[in-house]
Amino acid sequence: ERGVSFAEGGARELDLIGKSAGVLQRKLADEERLRGQWAADVAHDLRTPLAALRSQLEAMTDGVLPVTPDRLQRASGELARVEALVTDLGELSRIESPGMKPVFAEVDAARFLVELCGRFSLEAQRRRIDVSCSCAPGLVVEADSHLLHRAATNVLQNAFQHVADGGRVGVAIASRDGTVSIRVENTGAIPED
């Protein structure tokens, strides 16, 4: 049960137990909220590639689209994204566990940016998307590089997902007053509905 309160003013030992129980209730409520957010995020991440895969397969099955090697390759690409998300699900589960601790090390921001943008170079070429990447020279940050790559890749993937062919995507890493920021911009938009 949540919201159980324990009256204070009794024996000191019982007051301590009551306070500890209150702290435990708050922590459990926070964990439940985080778990719910996590499940919603996973559902959101899986919905897009599954919908794309289903629409492609249904159109080919109904004869609306001819079955071509290119279409099969795109369907296979969507399936690969779903597989990657399922792998990410396992990773998120590990990250969400109470014993998980980030591993901080120095990350060369320029090299990080080259690797990040490189992941999308083929898609950018195929869709004629102009990609600009800029980084403050000599910038080094303390971060868990694996988690940083994961977060930045997710944001950049969303930018590519919501930009039309021939559009623009920009990524910039800058430092101001000791704070490092990664900025992702695109010429796309998310539909209102």
Image (spheres, helix red, strand yellow):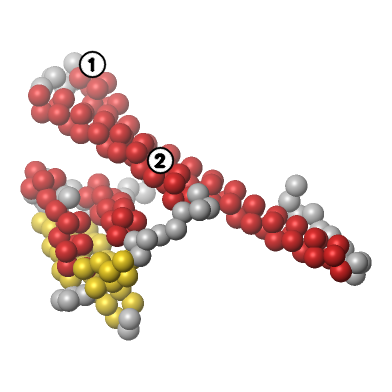
Instruction: Check disc 2 and give the amino acid type.
Output: Gly
Name the one closer to the observer, 108 or 130.
108
Marks 2/1 in contact by CB < 8 Å: the verdict is: no
* Image height of 54 relative to 95, above or below: above
Instruction: Check disc 1 and give the amino acid type.
Output: Thr
> How far from the left and from the top, in percent, is residue 40?
47, 44
> How far from the left and from the top, in percent, is residue 35?
53, 47
Residue at 27% x, 21% y: name it: 58
What residue is pinned by disc 2?
Answer: 90
> How far from the left and from the top, in percent, is residue 143?
33, 66
For mark 1, does the 10 Å Cα neighbourhood hold few (<14), some (14 to 19), or many (20 or more) residues?
A: few
Residue at 27% x, 53% y: name it: 153
Q: CA distance from mark 2 to mark 1?
A: 32 Å
Q: Which labelled disc corresponds to residue 61?
A: 1
Image quarter hosting the C terminus: top left
166 left or right of 86 in image = left
Residue 138 seen:
yes
Q: Nearer the viewer, mark 2 or mark 1?
A: 2
Residue at 36% x, 43% y: name it: 88
Residue at 58% x, 52% y: name it: 31
As drawn, the residue found furthest toward the right would be: 10
As drawn, the residue found furthest toward the top would be: 62
Name the one closer to the observer, 1 or 167.
1
* Image height of 99 relative to 175, above or below: above
Q: Helix, strand, or loop for circle 1? A: helix
